[in-house]
Image (cartoon, rainbow, N blue to C red):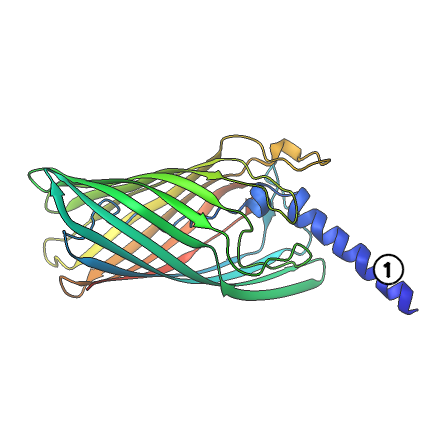
Amino acid sequence: MKNSRRLTRYIYLALAASFSHAACATELGLTNYPIGVNGILDGVYPEPGKTLLLNYNMYNKADKFKDDEGDSAIPGFENTTIVSSLRIIHTWNYVAGPFTFSSSFSVPWTRSETSMMGRSDTEQGIGNINLEPLHVNYVNSSKTFFASAYSNFFIKNGDYDSTRLANYTQNYDTASPIFAYTWFINGNWSTSGTLGIEFPLERNDETKYKSGDVFFAHPSIEYTPSSNRKLHFGLAGYYIKQLNNDSQPGVRIPGGGETRAVAIGTSVRYDFTRDLMFVLKYDHEVYSRNRAETQPLWLEIAYML
Protein backbone atom coordinates (compact mmCIF):
# COMPACT_ATOMS: atom_id res chain seq x y z
CA MET A 1 0.00 0.00 0.00
CA LYS A 2 2.83 2.39 0.87
CA ASN A 3 4.58 1.72 -2.48
CA SER A 4 1.26 2.22 -4.28
CA ARG A 5 0.77 5.63 -2.67
CA ARG A 6 4.33 6.60 -3.54
CA LEU A 7 3.86 5.54 -7.16
CA THR A 8 0.59 7.49 -7.35
CA ARG A 9 2.35 10.59 -6.02
CA TYR A 10 5.16 10.31 -8.59
CA ILE A 11 2.62 9.96 -11.42
CA TYR A 12 0.68 12.94 -10.10
CA LEU A 13 3.79 15.14 -9.92
CA ALA A 14 4.78 14.08 -13.43
CA LEU A 15 1.35 15.10 -14.73
CA ALA A 16 1.54 18.41 -12.89
CA ALA A 17 5.02 19.12 -14.29
CA SER A 18 3.89 18.33 -17.82
CA PHE A 19 1.00 20.81 -17.52
CA SER A 20 2.99 23.56 -15.84
CA HIS A 21 6.07 23.39 -18.05
CA ALA A 22 5.94 21.44 -21.31
CA ALA A 23 2.36 22.26 -22.24
CA CYS A 24 2.53 25.94 -21.37
CA ALA A 25 4.12 28.92 -23.06
CA THR A 26 7.06 31.09 -22.07
CA GLU A 27 7.21 28.82 -19.02
CA LEU A 28 3.71 29.39 -17.64
CA GLY A 29 3.22 32.41 -19.91
CA LEU A 30 5.23 34.55 -17.48
CA THR A 31 7.90 37.17 -18.02
CA ASN A 32 10.34 38.61 -15.53
CA TYR A 33 9.25 42.09 -16.56
CA PRO A 34 6.06 42.98 -14.61
CA ILE A 35 3.49 43.29 -17.40
CA GLY A 36 0.90 45.96 -16.57
CA VAL A 37 2.99 47.98 -14.14
CA ASN A 38 3.51 50.96 -16.46
CA GLY A 39 1.31 53.62 -18.01
CA ILE A 40 1.59 56.48 -15.50
CA LEU A 41 4.13 59.26 -16.22
CA ASP A 42 6.50 56.64 -17.66
CA GLY A 43 9.00 59.11 -19.14
CA VAL A 44 9.23 61.49 -16.17
CA TYR A 45 12.28 60.99 -13.93
CA PRO A 46 13.65 62.79 -10.85
CA GLU A 47 15.57 66.00 -11.38
CA PRO A 48 19.39 65.83 -11.02
CA GLY A 49 20.42 64.99 -7.48
CA LYS A 50 16.94 63.74 -6.51
CA THR A 51 15.80 60.21 -5.57
CA LEU A 52 12.36 58.70 -6.15
CA LEU A 53 11.00 55.88 -3.98
CA LEU A 54 8.31 53.72 -5.61
CA ASN A 55 6.18 50.98 -4.09
CA TYR A 56 4.23 48.73 -6.50
CA ASN A 57 1.54 46.46 -5.05
CA MET A 58 -0.38 43.99 -7.23
CA TYR A 59 -3.20 41.53 -6.61
CA ASN A 60 -4.29 39.12 -9.32
CA LYS A 61 -6.58 36.10 -9.35
CA ALA A 62 -6.75 33.93 -12.48
CA ASP A 63 -9.07 30.96 -12.98
CA LYS A 64 -8.26 30.08 -16.59
CA PHE A 65 -5.07 29.10 -18.36
CA LYS A 66 -5.59 29.64 -22.10
CA ASP A 67 -3.91 27.41 -24.69
CA ASP A 68 -2.87 28.37 -28.24
CA GLU A 69 -6.50 28.25 -29.41
CA GLY A 70 -7.88 30.25 -26.48
CA ASP A 71 -9.42 27.23 -24.74
CA SER A 72 -8.93 26.33 -21.09
CA ALA A 73 -5.77 24.18 -20.98
CA ILE A 74 -5.44 23.03 -17.35
CA PRO A 75 -8.34 21.36 -15.47
CA GLY A 76 -9.16 23.08 -12.19
CA PHE A 77 -6.51 25.78 -12.68
CA GLU A 78 -6.53 28.73 -10.31
CA ASN A 79 -3.77 31.11 -9.29
CA THR A 80 -3.67 34.00 -6.84
CA THR A 81 -0.59 36.22 -6.90
CA ILE A 82 0.27 39.06 -4.55
CA VAL A 83 3.33 41.24 -5.20
CA SER A 84 4.86 44.14 -3.30
CA SER A 85 7.95 45.62 -4.91
CA LEU A 86 10.22 48.44 -3.79
CA ARG A 87 11.97 50.45 -6.51
CA ILE A 88 14.49 53.28 -6.06
CA ILE A 89 15.43 55.67 -8.89
CA HIS A 90 18.28 58.17 -8.45
CA THR A 91 19.16 60.83 -11.02
CA TRP A 92 22.82 61.75 -10.96
CA ASN A 93 23.88 65.37 -10.52
CA TYR A 94 25.12 65.69 -14.10
CA VAL A 95 23.40 67.33 -17.08
CA ALA A 96 24.37 67.19 -20.77
CA GLY A 97 22.11 69.62 -22.66
CA PRO A 98 18.59 68.13 -22.61
CA PHE A 99 19.84 64.81 -21.17
CA THR A 100 20.09 63.56 -17.60
CA PHE A 101 21.17 60.15 -16.28
CA SER A 102 19.59 57.87 -13.69
CA SER A 103 20.14 54.47 -12.09
CA SER A 104 17.58 52.20 -10.48
CA PHE A 105 16.96 48.85 -8.83
CA SER A 106 13.93 47.01 -7.47
CA VAL A 107 13.31 44.10 -5.11
CA PRO A 108 9.97 42.23 -5.25
CA TRP A 109 8.27 40.13 -2.60
CA THR A 110 5.82 37.67 -4.15
CA ARG A 111 3.24 35.23 -2.82
CA SER A 112 1.84 32.69 -5.29
CA GLU A 113 -0.94 30.18 -4.64
CA THR A 114 -1.71 27.72 -7.45
CA SER A 115 -4.32 24.96 -7.68
CA MET A 116 -5.10 22.41 -10.37
CA MET A 117 -6.42 18.86 -10.67
CA GLY A 118 -7.39 18.87 -6.98
CA ARG A 119 -3.95 19.81 -5.68
CA SER A 120 -2.76 23.21 -4.39
CA ASP A 121 0.54 24.77 -3.41
CA THR A 122 1.59 28.12 -1.91
CA GLU A 123 5.05 29.70 -1.92
CA GLN A 124 6.36 33.17 -1.07
CA GLY A 125 9.65 35.03 -0.90
CA ILE A 126 11.97 37.57 -2.49
CA GLY A 127 11.93 37.12 -6.27
CA ASN A 128 14.28 38.06 -9.08
CA ILE A 129 16.26 41.26 -8.48
CA ASN A 130 15.92 43.99 -11.12
CA LEU A 131 18.94 46.16 -11.94
CA GLU A 132 18.76 49.23 -14.20
CA PRO A 133 22.34 50.55 -14.34
CA LEU A 134 21.83 53.53 -16.66
CA HIS A 135 18.81 55.50 -17.84
CA VAL A 136 19.41 58.16 -20.49
CA ASN A 137 16.63 60.71 -19.98
CA TYR A 138 15.49 63.49 -22.31
CA VAL A 139 13.25 66.53 -21.81
CA ASN A 140 12.45 69.16 -24.43
CA SER A 141 12.87 72.89 -23.83
CA SER A 142 9.16 73.46 -23.14
CA LYS A 143 9.10 70.57 -20.64
CA THR A 144 6.13 68.95 -22.38
CA PHE A 145 7.86 65.81 -23.68
CA PHE A 146 9.90 63.45 -21.51
CA ALA A 147 11.58 60.19 -22.51
CA SER A 148 14.01 57.60 -21.19
CA ALA A 149 15.96 54.72 -22.76
CA TYR A 150 17.51 52.00 -20.59
CA SER A 151 17.86 48.26 -20.01
CA ASN A 152 16.45 46.10 -17.23
CA PHE A 153 18.49 43.12 -16.05
CA PHE A 154 16.58 40.56 -13.98
CA ILE A 155 18.89 38.36 -11.91
CA LYS A 156 17.43 35.04 -10.79
CA ASN A 157 16.96 34.78 -7.06
CA GLY A 158 14.98 32.74 -4.58
CA ASP A 159 13.99 29.14 -4.10
CA TYR A 160 12.69 27.38 -7.24
CA ASP A 161 11.47 23.78 -7.45
CA SER A 162 10.09 22.35 -10.70
CA THR A 163 7.97 19.78 -8.82
CA ARG A 164 5.96 22.50 -7.05
CA LEU A 165 2.80 23.94 -8.53
CA ALA A 166 3.64 27.39 -7.15
CA ASN A 167 6.92 29.26 -7.51
CA TYR A 168 7.47 32.91 -6.67
CA THR A 169 10.45 33.41 -8.98
CA GLN A 170 11.47 32.76 -12.58
CA ASN A 171 14.53 30.52 -12.62
CA TYR A 172 16.51 32.34 -15.33
CA ASP A 173 18.13 35.71 -16.08
CA THR A 174 16.69 38.14 -18.62
CA ALA A 175 17.52 41.49 -20.23
CA SER A 176 14.90 44.00 -21.40
CA PRO A 177 15.76 47.13 -23.42
CA ILE A 178 13.09 49.77 -22.73
CA PHE A 179 11.88 53.05 -24.20
CA ALA A 180 9.46 55.12 -22.08
CA TYR A 181 7.83 58.47 -22.77
CA THR A 182 5.35 61.04 -21.46
CA TRP A 183 3.83 63.86 -23.53
CA PHE A 184 1.81 66.63 -21.89
CA ILE A 185 -0.48 67.49 -24.80
CA ASN A 186 -2.13 70.44 -23.03
CA GLY A 187 -3.27 71.42 -19.56
CA ASN A 188 -5.85 68.64 -19.39
CA TRP A 189 -4.50 65.74 -21.45
CA SER A 190 -1.29 63.70 -21.42
CA THR A 191 -0.16 60.37 -22.81
CA SER A 192 2.49 57.95 -21.60
CA GLY A 193 3.82 54.59 -22.67
CA THR A 194 6.52 51.96 -22.31
CA LEU A 195 7.84 49.75 -25.12
CA GLY A 196 10.26 46.88 -24.57
CA ILE A 197 11.45 43.40 -25.45
CA GLU A 198 12.40 40.74 -22.90
CA PHE A 199 15.26 38.46 -23.92
CA PRO A 200 15.75 35.36 -21.74
CA LEU A 201 19.52 34.89 -21.36
CA GLU A 202 19.46 31.19 -20.47
CA ARG A 203 17.31 28.11 -20.00
CA ASN A 204 15.63 27.27 -16.76
CA ASP A 205 18.32 24.91 -15.47
CA GLU A 206 15.76 22.70 -13.66
CA THR A 207 13.23 22.23 -16.44
CA LYS A 208 15.58 22.92 -19.42
CA TYR A 209 12.81 25.14 -20.78
CA LYS A 210 13.96 28.10 -22.94
CA SER A 211 11.38 30.86 -23.18
CA GLY A 212 11.07 32.96 -26.32
CA ASP A 213 11.61 36.71 -26.66
CA VAL A 214 8.56 38.82 -25.82
CA PHE A 215 7.59 42.30 -27.06
CA PHE A 216 5.36 44.36 -24.76
CA ALA A 217 3.75 47.79 -24.86
CA HIS A 218 1.91 49.79 -22.17
CA PRO A 219 0.11 52.78 -23.75
CA SER A 220 -2.07 55.14 -21.74
CA ILE A 221 -3.86 58.47 -21.87
CA GLU A 222 -4.67 60.60 -18.83
CA TYR A 223 -7.18 63.42 -18.23
CA THR A 224 -6.79 66.10 -15.53
CA PRO A 225 -9.95 68.13 -14.81
CA SER A 226 -9.44 71.89 -14.58
CA SER A 227 -11.47 71.95 -11.37
CA ASN A 228 -9.02 69.68 -9.50
CA ARG A 229 -5.42 69.64 -10.71
CA LYS A 230 -4.46 66.92 -8.20
CA LEU A 231 -6.86 64.33 -9.62
CA HIS A 232 -6.17 62.41 -12.85
CA PHE A 233 -8.23 59.77 -14.69
CA GLY A 234 -6.61 57.37 -17.12
CA LEU A 235 -7.29 54.76 -19.78
CA ALA A 236 -4.52 52.22 -20.06
CA GLY A 237 -3.74 48.66 -21.04
CA TYR A 238 -1.04 46.43 -22.46
CA TYR A 239 -0.14 44.33 -25.46
CA ILE A 240 2.13 41.24 -25.42
CA LYS A 241 3.44 39.37 -28.44
CA GLN A 242 6.04 36.63 -28.29
CA LEU A 243 8.50 36.93 -31.18
CA ASN A 244 9.86 33.38 -31.43
CA ASN A 245 9.10 29.89 -30.17
CA ASP A 246 9.77 28.39 -26.78
CA SER A 247 11.88 25.24 -26.76
CA GLN A 248 12.50 22.25 -24.51
CA PRO A 249 14.65 19.24 -25.40
CA GLY A 250 12.58 16.26 -26.52
CA VAL A 251 9.25 18.10 -26.23
CA ARG A 252 7.00 19.43 -28.98
CA ILE A 253 5.34 22.61 -27.71
CA PRO A 254 1.95 23.26 -29.38
CA GLY A 255 2.00 26.48 -31.44
CA GLY A 256 5.58 27.08 -30.34
CA GLY A 257 4.18 28.20 -27.00
CA GLU A 258 3.93 31.79 -28.18
CA THR A 259 2.34 34.02 -25.55
CA ARG A 260 -0.04 36.79 -26.68
CA ALA A 261 -2.32 39.06 -24.69
CA VAL A 262 -4.29 42.29 -24.92
CA ALA A 263 -5.65 44.12 -21.88
CA ILE A 264 -7.61 47.32 -21.36
CA GLY A 265 -7.92 49.15 -18.08
CA THR A 266 -8.51 52.30 -16.11
CA SER A 267 -6.53 54.26 -13.55
CA VAL A 268 -6.97 57.00 -10.98
CA ARG A 269 -4.02 59.07 -9.80
CA TYR A 270 -4.04 61.54 -6.91
CA ASP A 271 -1.19 63.93 -6.10
CA PHE A 272 -1.36 64.57 -2.37
CA THR A 273 1.65 66.88 -2.53
CA ARG A 274 4.36 67.73 -5.04
CA ASP A 275 6.37 64.80 -3.63
CA LEU A 276 3.68 62.18 -2.86
CA MET A 277 1.44 60.41 -5.40
CA PHE A 278 -0.97 57.45 -5.25
CA VAL A 279 -2.21 55.42 -8.25
CA LEU A 280 -4.98 52.81 -8.36
CA LYS A 281 -5.07 50.85 -11.63
CA TYR A 282 -7.00 47.86 -12.97
CA ASP A 283 -6.35 45.88 -16.16
CA HIS A 284 -8.65 43.32 -17.77
CA GLU A 285 -7.30 40.88 -20.36
CA VAL A 286 -9.69 40.61 -23.30
CA TYR A 287 -7.42 38.27 -25.27
CA SER A 288 -5.03 35.64 -23.86
CA ARG A 289 -3.07 32.81 -25.44
CA ASN A 290 -0.64 30.40 -23.76
CA ARG A 291 -0.90 32.15 -20.39
CA ALA A 292 -3.18 32.60 -17.42
CA GLU A 293 -5.96 35.09 -18.17
CA THR A 294 -5.13 37.86 -15.71
CA GLN A 295 -7.00 40.82 -14.22
CA PRO A 296 -4.36 42.62 -12.12
CA LEU A 297 -5.26 45.32 -9.61
CA TRP A 298 -2.40 47.73 -8.81
CA LEU A 299 -1.79 50.18 -6.00
CA GLU A 300 1.28 52.32 -6.66
CA ILE A 301 2.85 54.87 -4.35
CA ALA A 302 5.55 57.36 -5.38
CA TYR A 303 7.50 59.52 -2.94
CA MET A 304 10.29 61.95 -3.79
CA LEU A 305 12.99 61.81 -1.12
Dot 1 lies on which element? helix
Q: In the image, residue 45 lies at what x, y percent?
A: 20, 49
- Residue sitting at 12 percent across and 59 percent down? 228
Amino acid at pointer 1: Leu
Q: Is residue 245 left or right of residue 198?
A: right
In the rendered view, would you say 293 is above or below 78? above
Image coordinates for residue 112, horizontal then vertical, percent? 54, 62
Q: Please indicate, yes or no, whether residue 170 appears anywhere in the rendered image.
A: yes
The residue positioned farthest toward the bottom in the image shown: 2
**Image x and y of residue 90, in percent:** 23, 55
Is residue 184 something that shows in the picture?
A: no
Quadrant occupied by the C terminus: bottom left
Which residue is under mark 1? Answer: 7
Vertically, is 97 above or below 34?
Answer: above
Where residue 122 sits, quadrant-wise, is bottom right
Give residue 101's position: percent from left, percent from top: 21, 45
Does residue 304 sit above or below 42 in this rendering?
below
Residue 2 lies left or right of residue 186; in this view the side is right
Residue nearest the observer in this picture, 42 or 91: 91
Q: Residue at x 39, y 42 (%)?
A: 238
How packed mark 1 is, by other alpha carbons closer than 10 Å (few <14, some 14-19, many 20 or more), is few
Point 23% across, 48% down: residue = 102
